[in-house]
Amino acid sequence: MKWALLVTVAVLALVASVAVGPAAVPLGELLRSDIVWNLRAPRTLLAFLVGGSLGIAGAGLQALVRNPLADPFLLGLSGGAGLGAVLAIALHLSGPWALPLAAFAGALAALALVYRLGLMGGAALDPRILLLGGVAIGAFAAAITTAIVSLADASELRNAFLWLWGGLSSASWDAVLVIVLYAPIPIAVLLAASRPLDLLALGEEPARYLGADVDAVKRRVYLAASLLTAAAVAVSGVIGFVGLVVPHLARLTWGHRHRALLPAAFVGGGALLAIADTLARTVVAPRELPVGVVTALIGVPVFTLLLRRWTIA
Amino acid sequence: MRAFLLSVLMLAGCSSPAGRPHGPTARRIVSLLPSFTEILFDIGAGDRVVGRTTWCDYPPAALAVPSVGDGIPPNIEAVAARQPDLVVLYNSGPNVTAAKQLERIGIRTVLLDVNRLEDLGPAARTLGRLTGREKIADSLAGAMDSLAARPPPPATASITFVVWDNPPIVIGRGSYLHQIAELAGARNVFADLAAPSAQVSLETIAARNPDWIAVLSDSSVMPGFAKRPEWQAVRAVRDRHFLLLPGSLFGHPGPRTAQAVSELQRLLRK
Amino acid sequence: MNNMTEPLLRLNAVRYRYPGASSDALAGVSLSVGPGDFHAVIGPNGSGKTTLVRVALGALAPLAGSADIDGRPASRWPRQALARLVGVVPQREDNLFPQRVRETVLLGRYAHLSLWGRERPEDHAAVMRALTACDAQHLVERWVWTLSGGEYQRVRVARALAQGPRLLVLDEPAVSLDLQHEMGLFELIRGLVDTQGLGVLMITHDLNLAARFADSLLLLEGGRPIASGPPADVLTQQTVETVFSWPVRMETVDGRPQMIPLRQPKESRA
C-alpha cells in the first residue's frame, strides 16, 4: 500500500539522517551521543519539517495558480528573504535570531507587495498576476541584494551567497520548536482547502457553481503557502526544487485529489530533504555541500524524467 | 610547484612593451593587497607606492597614500587615475580579468600568489627586482623563507579558525593561517582539508573538538555565533575558549608574520 | 421553507451593466422558471445571455430589479446551499488534470460533504444515479480525456445532477456536438424535466432545437427582451428576421415552429 511505503521511506530517511554523518558516531552510542542529540536530531527534524512545508506549499500553489511549473520560490519570497538576510549581515545586526527574523521580515514584505499586486485586477486574487508579480518582486529584491552585497565588506560576499543557497547548519531545538508551533496552522488551512482545490481545477466559474467560496480559497491558500515558505526560507535559506518536484512525484502515485496529495507532498518533501541533507553532509565529508545544490542535483534529473513521461504519454 | 610559480612570475615580469628581461624599474606603484604594501614599504620602496587599498593600514606611513577602493574587485578607473607604471595584484580569478583590462590601457601588471607562507619569499624577490631594491628584498625574502621552512614545534593545543558561522566555514591547510597556527604550536583540526577554506558540518567541528576557536576580529567581544544554541555542542564554545585575532596582524601575511606567530603563542599560553 | 407556488428562479425587470461599459448588458429582463419548466434563452451573439445566467445565479448583483432563487435574492444565498439547489453546466471548463469519470462527477457532491468528512455511500450512489439518468453509467471508469465531445457533455450534466438540484442551468451545452449527440443531449434534458420534475434554464443558439424541446423561450437582443412565451409565439418569421437580420422561411414540426434560413440572391448582396 502506497502510504505504508511512503511512511517507511520517510522513517528510514530520518533514521539514516540521524545515524549517518561526517562525525562517525558508532551505532551503539547513538542514543548517548551529544552530537546526535544536539546537532543531528534537531537538524534531521528541521529538514523534515522544512522539506514537508515546501512540498505541501508547492502542491497548494500549483493548484492555486493552475500551473504545474509553479514553485514556492516564484512568489518573490526568496528574493525578499535574501534581501532581509543580506541587510542583516551588511548592517552587522547582532543576536542569534537576527538573521532568521530579518529573512522572515523580508519575505513578509515581499508577500505583502505581491498580494497587493495580485489584487490589481479587482477584488479577487488573479493567479496569473500573482505569478508574474512574484517573479518581478523577486527580481527586484535580488537586484537590490546584489547591490548591497557589492557595496558591503568583501568577506561577507561569499558568505551571503552561501547562505542564500540554503543550509540547515543553523538547526537547533529552538528552531525546531518554532517551526513546530508555527507550521500546523498554515498546513491545516491548506488541508482544509483540499476539496475546493480539486474543484478549482475545473476553473473558477465552475468551482463557484459547485459551491466553493473561490475568493476565500484563493486568499487562504496563497497566504498559507506563502507563510510556510517564508518560515522555511528564514530558517534554512532558499532550498529549490523541493516545492516544484515533490508535488509532481506525489501526483504520479496519488493522483490529483488533494485530500491525499497534500499530505503525501508533505511527507515526501520531508523525506526528500532529509535525504538530501544527509548527502550534503556526507558525500564530501568533512566538507559540506549547500543542501540547495543537492536538491537541484537530484531534482533536475527527476524533473527531466517526469517531463519525458508526460511528452511520451 | 614552486618552480612553476617562479616561472609564472618571471613571465609576468617579462610583459613589458620594451621586451627587456625585467623591464624598467617601477616608479609609481599601485598595490592592491596589504601584503604587497607592507613588503614594498619594508624594502624601502614605500615612497613609490602611489595607490593602496582601504585594507592597507600598515605601516602607518601607508595611510598617507591615496586609497583606490577596497580592491574587490579592483576599481580600474581609480587605479588608472593614479597613473601607475606598475600594479601589483593578488592572483585570483577576478584579478586576472582586472589585470587584462589594465594591460589593455597600457599599464603593466603583475599577479602574485600569497596563499601560503612559502609564497612570500618569491613575492618579495619579485617586488625587489621590479623596484631595483633586490639586495634588501633578498634579505627580507630569506627571513620569510626560513620562517616558512621552520619545523613546527610539537603541538600543545588544537585549534580551528572559523571564518563564517552560517554555514560554518573553516581554514584548511592551504592557508597561511594554518601555518601560523602550526608555527605557534597549535594543531589545526582541519589539517586534512587541502583548500585554504571550506564549508564543513557543525557536527564535524564538534566531533573534532578543538581546544580553541580562532576568529579574525578587531573587537574584544565574543563573536555572535557564541550564543547560538546549536554551537553549544562544540566544547570550545561552551567553555568560551575563543582567540580573537586582530585582522591587521593576522590577515596580512608578510613581513609581520613572525610577529603574528609570537602573538598567537602568547595568547595560547594564557 | 419552500413555497410550492414560488418559482425556482425569478428575474424581475433586471438591469445590469458591466463596470466601464458604455451600455447595459441587460435591461428590463424578466424570467420565471418553476419545477417542470424547460425555459430556453435565445438571441444573437452579445445579446446578454451569459450575463443573464450570472445575474440569475447571484454571481453578479443587478443594478435594478431583482434576481431571486426560491424566493430569496440570489446573491444572498450561501454558496453551498445554492449548489444543493441549482446545478450549473457552464459553457467552458478546464481539464487540467487527468481524471476518471467517477471522480469528476463526484466533485458535484462537494456541497453535500462536511469539511473533513469523507465521501459516503450515499454520495457514490448519487453519482451512479446521475450517470444512469444521463445514460452514461457505462463510462464511469473511463478517463475523461478519452471521452468524445458528446459523452463528455453527458458526464458534465451528470455532475450537475449529482448535486441533487431542483433547477438545472446550462449555458450553450450543445456547442460543437454533432447532430446525434446534440439531439441526444436535448432529449436527455427534456427527459429529466418530464421524469424528475426539474426546472431547466438553458442558453442556446440553436433556435430550432430550443423551439422543439423547450416549454418557453425568451428572446434577447442587445440585453433587451424582444419576446417571451411559448415557442410558437416567440419564433415568428417577422421576429426572427428582424432580430437575426436574415431572411427565413418558417415550417412547423411536431406543432413547433422551425425556421429555415434562406440563401441571399446574388444581386441583393451588397
Image (cartoon, coloured by chain):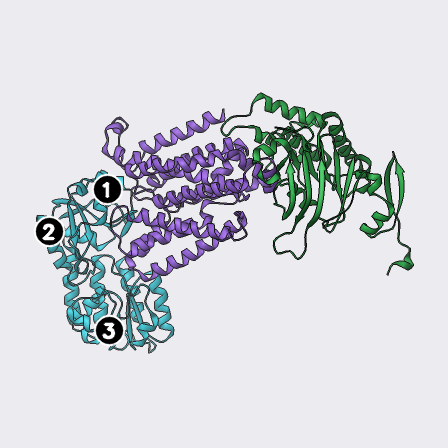
Please state which of residues A41 and C35 is positioned toward the viewer in this rendering.
C35
The residue identified by callout 3 is B66
- In this rendering, is residue C3 above or below C28? above
Chain C colour as displayed: green
- Host chain of mark 2: B
- Host chain of mark 1: B
- Does A151 sit left or right of B152 as displayed? right
Query: Circle 3 sits in a helix, a strand or a loop, which is it?
Result: loop
List x then y, in percent, for residue C21.
64, 56
- Host chain of mark 3: B
Chain B colour as displayed: cyan
Which quadrant would the N terminus of chain C be assigned to in this image?
top right
The residue identified by callout 2 is B267
Please state which of residues C177 and B87 is positioned toward the viewer in this rendering.
C177
Crowd around label 3: few <14 · some 14–19 · many ≥20 (10 Å): some
Residue A274 can be seen, yes or no: no
